[in-house]
Image (tube, helix red, strand yellow):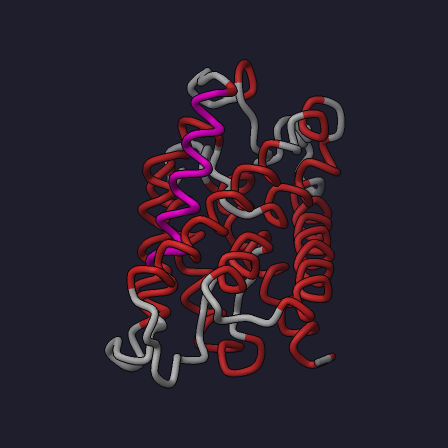
Amino acid sequence: MMKKLVAEFLGTAWLVLGGCGSAVLAAGFPELGIGFVGVSLAFGLTVVTMAYAIGHVSGCHLNPAVSVGLWAGGRFPAKELPGYVVAQVLGGLAGAGALYMIASGAPAFEVGGFASNGFGEHSPGGYSMQAALVCEVALTFAFLFVIMGATHGNAPRGFAPLAIGLCLTLIHLISIPVTNTSVNPARSTGPAILVGGWAVQQLWLFWVAPLIGGALGGFVYRWLSPVDPAPLDVKGG
Protein backbone atom coordinates (compact mmCIF):
# COMPACT_ATOMS: atom_id res chain seq x y z
CA MET A 1 0.00 0.00 0.00
CA MET A 2 2.83 2.43 0.80
CA LYS A 3 4.22 2.11 -2.73
CA LYS A 4 0.79 2.96 -4.14
CA LEU A 5 0.55 6.06 -1.98
CA VAL A 6 4.05 7.23 -2.89
CA ALA A 7 3.20 6.72 -6.56
CA GLU A 8 0.03 8.81 -6.18
CA PHE A 9 1.95 11.53 -4.35
CA LEU A 10 4.63 11.74 -7.05
CA GLY A 11 2.14 11.51 -9.90
CA THR A 12 -0.09 14.26 -8.55
CA ALA A 13 2.93 16.47 -7.88
CA TRP A 14 3.92 16.00 -11.53
CA LEU A 15 0.40 16.83 -12.72
CA VAL A 16 0.39 20.12 -10.79
CA LEU A 17 3.97 21.04 -11.65
CA GLY A 18 3.53 20.21 -15.32
CA GLY A 19 0.00 21.45 -15.87
CA CYS A 20 -0.08 24.49 -13.61
CA GLY A 21 3.56 25.16 -14.42
CA SER A 22 2.72 25.52 -18.09
CA ALA A 23 0.09 28.12 -17.15
CA VAL A 24 2.27 30.06 -14.70
CA LEU A 25 5.60 29.92 -16.51
CA ALA A 26 4.82 29.59 -20.21
CA ALA A 27 1.24 30.52 -21.13
CA GLY A 28 1.73 34.28 -21.17
CA PHE A 29 5.40 34.46 -22.08
CA PRO A 30 5.93 37.28 -24.59
CA GLU A 31 5.89 36.07 -28.21
CA LEU A 32 6.49 32.44 -27.24
CA GLY A 33 3.49 31.96 -24.93
CA ILE A 34 1.73 28.61 -25.37
CA GLY A 35 -1.75 29.97 -24.56
CA PHE A 36 -4.84 27.98 -23.54
CA VAL A 37 -4.17 25.25 -26.10
CA GLY A 38 -0.66 24.67 -24.80
CA VAL A 39 -1.82 24.53 -21.19
CA SER A 40 -4.55 22.06 -22.16
CA LEU A 41 -2.01 19.82 -23.86
CA ALA A 42 0.34 20.08 -20.88
CA PHE A 43 -2.30 18.76 -18.49
CA GLY A 44 -3.10 15.92 -20.86
CA LEU A 45 0.57 15.05 -21.25
CA THR A 46 1.12 14.87 -17.50
CA VAL A 47 -1.57 12.20 -17.28
CA VAL A 48 -0.33 10.24 -20.29
CA THR A 49 3.26 10.17 -19.06
CA MET A 50 2.39 9.24 -15.49
CA ALA A 51 -0.18 6.65 -16.53
CA TYR A 52 2.54 4.75 -18.38
CA ALA A 53 4.99 5.32 -15.50
CA ILE A 54 2.90 4.38 -12.45
CA GLY A 55 -0.33 2.92 -13.79
CA HIS A 56 0.87 -0.56 -12.91
CA VAL A 57 1.74 0.59 -9.36
CA SER A 58 -1.26 2.59 -8.15
CA GLY A 59 -3.64 2.87 -11.11
CA CYS A 60 -2.49 6.48 -11.59
CA HIS A 61 -5.60 8.21 -10.24
CA LEU A 62 -3.87 11.53 -9.36
CA ASN A 63 -7.26 12.91 -8.41
CA PRO A 64 -9.68 12.39 -5.48
CA ALA A 65 -12.61 12.65 -7.89
CA VAL A 66 -11.18 9.81 -9.97
CA SER A 67 -10.67 7.63 -6.90
CA VAL A 68 -14.24 8.31 -5.75
CA GLY A 69 -15.57 7.70 -9.25
CA LEU A 70 -13.73 4.39 -9.56
CA TRP A 71 -15.13 3.37 -6.19
CA ALA A 72 -18.62 4.29 -7.38
CA GLY A 73 -17.99 2.26 -10.53
CA GLY A 74 -16.96 -0.81 -8.55
CA ARG A 75 -13.31 -0.59 -9.55
CA PHE A 76 -11.71 0.61 -6.31
CA PRO A 77 -12.09 -0.48 -2.67
CA ALA A 78 -13.51 2.04 -0.22
CA LYS A 79 -10.90 1.17 2.40
CA GLU A 80 -8.14 2.63 0.19
CA LEU A 81 -9.93 5.92 -0.52
CA PRO A 82 -8.67 7.93 2.50
CA GLY A 83 -5.03 7.06 1.87
CA TYR A 84 -5.26 7.87 -1.83
CA VAL A 85 -6.96 11.22 -1.22
CA VAL A 86 -4.38 12.28 1.39
CA ALA A 87 -1.49 11.26 -0.88
CA GLN A 88 -3.00 13.14 -3.83
CA VAL A 89 -3.58 16.33 -1.85
CA LEU A 90 -0.07 16.24 -0.42
CA GLY A 91 1.29 15.65 -3.92
CA GLY A 92 -0.66 18.63 -5.21
CA LEU A 93 0.78 20.78 -2.44
CA ALA A 94 4.29 19.57 -3.21
CA GLY A 95 3.90 20.27 -6.92
CA ALA A 96 2.54 23.75 -6.23
CA GLY A 97 5.35 24.41 -3.76
CA ALA A 98 8.00 23.39 -6.28
CA LEU A 99 6.35 25.59 -8.91
CA TYR A 100 6.30 28.52 -6.50
CA MET A 101 10.02 28.17 -5.82
CA ILE A 102 10.73 28.17 -9.55
CA ALA A 103 8.37 31.02 -10.46
CA SER A 104 9.51 33.24 -7.59
CA GLY A 105 13.02 33.21 -9.06
CA ALA A 106 11.90 35.69 -11.72
CA PRO A 107 12.68 39.33 -10.84
CA ALA A 108 9.16 40.57 -11.57
CA PHE A 109 7.36 37.68 -9.88
CA GLU A 110 3.93 38.28 -8.36
CA VAL A 111 1.88 35.37 -7.10
CA GLY A 112 -1.35 36.65 -8.70
CA GLY A 113 -3.82 33.87 -9.39
CA PHE A 114 -1.07 31.23 -9.63
CA ALA A 115 -3.25 28.95 -11.81
CA SER A 116 -5.94 28.81 -9.12
CA ASN A 117 -9.52 27.94 -9.98
CA GLY A 118 -12.29 30.45 -9.50
CA PHE A 119 -15.71 31.76 -10.45
CA GLY A 120 -17.29 35.18 -10.74
CA GLU A 121 -14.62 37.86 -10.88
CA HIS A 122 -11.96 35.16 -10.51
CA SER A 123 -13.16 33.18 -13.52
CA PRO A 124 -11.00 33.88 -16.61
CA GLY A 125 -14.19 34.64 -18.53
CA GLY A 126 -16.20 36.06 -15.63
CA TYR A 127 -18.52 33.04 -15.43
CA SER A 128 -20.96 32.75 -12.52
CA MET A 129 -20.81 30.30 -9.63
CA GLN A 130 -23.72 28.35 -11.14
CA ALA A 131 -21.97 28.07 -14.49
CA ALA A 132 -18.77 26.94 -12.79
CA LEU A 133 -20.62 24.34 -10.74
CA VAL A 134 -22.42 22.86 -13.75
CA CYS A 135 -19.23 22.91 -15.81
CA GLU A 136 -17.14 21.10 -13.20
CA VAL A 137 -19.81 18.47 -12.49
CA ALA A 138 -20.47 17.77 -16.18
CA LEU A 139 -16.83 17.60 -17.23
CA THR A 140 -15.76 15.43 -14.30
CA PHE A 141 -18.68 13.14 -15.11
CA ALA A 142 -17.40 12.88 -18.69
CA PHE A 143 -13.84 12.31 -17.47
CA LEU A 144 -14.87 9.35 -15.30
CA PHE A 145 -17.06 7.98 -18.05
CA VAL A 146 -14.09 7.93 -20.42
CA ILE A 147 -11.77 6.49 -17.76
CA MET A 148 -14.21 3.67 -16.98
CA GLY A 149 -14.61 2.84 -20.66
CA ALA A 150 -10.95 3.13 -21.62
CA THR A 151 -9.89 0.83 -18.78
CA HIS A 152 -12.65 -1.72 -19.31
CA GLY A 153 -11.46 -5.28 -19.77
CA ASN A 154 -12.85 -5.31 -23.32
CA ALA A 155 -11.21 -2.01 -24.33
CA PRO A 156 -8.18 -2.07 -26.67
CA ARG A 157 -5.08 -2.84 -24.65
CA GLY A 158 -2.42 -0.22 -24.12
CA PHE A 159 -4.42 2.80 -25.32
CA ALA A 160 -6.10 3.82 -22.06
CA PRO A 161 -3.50 6.47 -21.11
CA LEU A 162 -3.84 8.13 -24.52
CA ALA A 163 -7.64 8.23 -24.40
CA ILE A 164 -7.63 9.57 -20.85
CA GLY A 165 -4.94 12.16 -21.54
CA LEU A 166 -6.74 13.38 -24.65
CA CYS A 167 -9.98 13.58 -22.69
CA LEU A 168 -8.31 15.76 -20.06
CA THR A 169 -6.89 17.95 -22.84
CA LEU A 170 -10.37 18.40 -24.30
CA ILE A 171 -11.79 19.18 -20.87
CA HIS A 172 -9.25 21.99 -20.47
CA LEU A 173 -9.97 23.34 -23.95
CA ILE A 174 -13.62 23.62 -22.94
CA SER A 175 -13.36 24.93 -19.41
CA ILE A 176 -10.22 27.04 -18.93
CA PRO A 177 -12.27 30.17 -19.72
CA VAL A 178 -14.94 29.12 -17.20
CA THR A 179 -13.05 28.01 -14.09
CA ASN A 180 -9.42 27.70 -15.19
CA THR A 181 -10.32 23.98 -15.11
CA SER A 182 -10.22 21.86 -12.01
CA VAL A 183 -12.03 18.49 -12.31
CA ASN A 184 -9.48 17.58 -9.62
CA PRO A 185 -9.64 18.75 -5.98
CA ALA A 186 -5.95 17.97 -5.39
CA ARG A 187 -4.92 20.10 -8.38
CA SER A 188 -7.05 22.95 -7.03
CA THR A 189 -5.90 22.76 -3.42
CA GLY A 190 -2.16 23.26 -3.92
CA PRO A 191 -2.32 26.57 -5.82
CA ALA A 192 -5.23 27.83 -3.69
CA ILE A 193 -3.28 27.38 -0.45
CA LEU A 194 -0.40 29.43 -1.84
CA VAL A 195 -2.66 32.20 -3.15
CA GLY A 196 -4.88 32.28 -0.03
CA GLY A 197 -7.77 34.73 0.31
CA TRP A 198 -10.34 34.36 -2.47
CA ALA A 199 -8.80 31.15 -3.81
CA VAL A 200 -9.27 29.35 -0.50
CA GLN A 201 -12.76 30.84 -0.06
CA GLN A 202 -13.84 29.45 -3.45
CA LEU A 203 -12.04 26.13 -3.08
CA TRP A 204 -15.16 24.39 -1.76
CA LEU A 205 -16.71 24.36 -5.24
CA PHE A 206 -13.66 22.63 -6.69
CA TRP A 207 -14.05 19.83 -4.17
CA VAL A 208 -17.83 19.47 -4.21
CA ALA A 209 -18.43 19.63 -7.97
CA PRO A 210 -15.68 17.19 -9.10
CA LEU A 211 -16.58 14.67 -6.39
CA ILE A 212 -20.25 14.76 -7.42
CA GLY A 213 -19.39 14.51 -11.11
CA GLY A 214 -16.89 11.71 -10.54
CA ALA A 215 -19.30 9.64 -8.46
CA LEU A 216 -22.08 10.10 -11.02
CA GLY A 217 -19.76 9.11 -13.86
CA GLY A 218 -18.74 5.95 -12.06
CA PHE A 219 -22.30 4.96 -11.12
CA VAL A 220 -23.68 5.59 -14.62
CA TYR A 221 -20.95 3.67 -16.41
CA ARG A 222 -21.33 0.78 -13.97
CA TRP A 223 -25.04 0.67 -14.82
CA LEU A 224 -24.35 0.95 -18.56
CA SER A 225 -21.68 -1.74 -18.63
CA PRO A 226 -21.89 -3.87 -15.48
CA VAL A 227 -19.86 -6.77 -16.90
CA ASP A 228 -16.19 -5.88 -16.66
CA PRO A 229 -13.95 -8.91 -17.25
CA ALA A 230 -10.30 -8.41 -16.20
CA PRO A 231 -10.31 -4.59 -15.91
CA LEU A 232 -7.08 -2.94 -16.95
CA ASP A 233 -4.75 -1.55 -14.31
CA VAL A 234 -4.15 1.93 -15.67
CA LYS A 235 -6.88 4.38 -14.63
CA GLY A 236 -5.42 7.83 -15.14
CA GLY A 237 -6.59 11.02 -13.46
The x, y position of residue 117, in whole percent, is 56, 32
Residue 4 quadrant: bottom right
Identity of the residue drawn at 35% across and 48% down: 142
Identity of the residue drawn at 28% across and 82% down: 157
Identity of the residue drawn at 44% across and 52% down: 43
Query: Is residue 168 found left or right of 15 in the rendered image?
Result: left
- Residue 32 in view (yes/no): no
The image shows residue 63, relative to residue 131, as above or below, that is below
Residue 150 quadrant: bottom left
Which residue reaches farthest bottom? Answer: 230
Magenta run includes residue 99: no
- Asked whether 20 or 154 is in front, the reply is 154
Identity of the residue drawn at 58% across and 61% down: 14
- Asked whether 164 or 210 is in front, the reply is 210
The image shows residue 52, relative to residue 213, as above or below, that is below
The x, y position of residue 56, in whole percent, is 50, 83
The image shows residue 92, relative to residue 74, as above or below, that is above
- Residue 154 in view (yes/no): yes
Name the image quarter holding the N terminus. bottom right
Query: Is residue 222 found left or right of 98 in the rendered image?
Result: left
Residue 100 quadrant: top right
The x, y position of residue 226, in whole percent, is 34, 69
Q: What's the magenta region? A: 130-146
The x, y position of residue 66, in whole percent, is 51, 58
- Asked whether 221 or 113 is in front, the reply is 221
Query: Is residue 211 found left or right of 49 in the rendered image?
Result: right
Instruction: Assign the magenta stretch its main secondary structure.
Output: helix
- Asked whether 212 or 100 is in front, the reply is 212
